[in-house]
Amino acid sequence: MKDDLLKQYSIFEVKRALSEVEREYGREQVEHIVGRDRAEEIDREFEKEIALRVEPYWKNILAYERGGFFTQAFLRLKYSLRSKSGECGVPQSVLEAIVDDMMPDIRAFFESEEGMREFEEWKKTRELKQAEKETKSTQKKQ
């Protein structure tokens, strides 16, 4: 019965629902609902699907960073001709599942001392860059 229900939905919908249960009640409740082995299998399936859907974008980023002039020019042209609406081609359900999966780790990092320290450093760097921009724009006007 449990597997029949899981086959009706995409892995992203299942992972999102289980993430909500896990966030509210803990991992034990997820394992109770679908079974420990199935919960681990769902995690593996989710990671595979994420890799399949996001890998082409990662490859393009790496190719751009490491590639020569022609590779970079091709990728710039390829992405400049795409929709200007900000859509990346990754389905919304995939993006939401990624966010749901990563959010607890992101929150934990920014609540830690190291995360707070890095955030403060980032804010200082941003303020310095903003001040430099304002100085340059003031100098150009004069």
Image (spheres, helix red, strand yellow):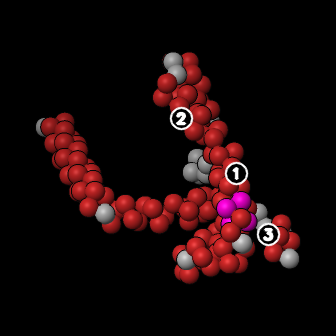
Residue 119's image quarter? bottom left
The amino acid at mark 3 is Leu
Residue on which disc 3 sits: 6
Q: Nearer the viewer, mark 2 or mark 3?
A: 3
Q: Earlier in the sequence, mark 3 or mark 1?
A: 3
| Residue 61 - label | 2
Q: Position of residue 121 (x, y in %)?
A: 23, 51
| Residue 110 - label | none
SS of the residue at dot 2?
Answer: helix
* 96 to the left or right of 14: left
The amino acid at mark 1 is Glu
86 lies above or below 99: above
Q: Position of residue 10 (x, y in %)?
A: 76, 63
The amino acid at mark 2 is Ile
63 lies above or below 39: above
Circles 3 and 1: CB atoms closer than 8 Å: no
Please state the extent of the stretch shown in magenta in the rendering.
38-42
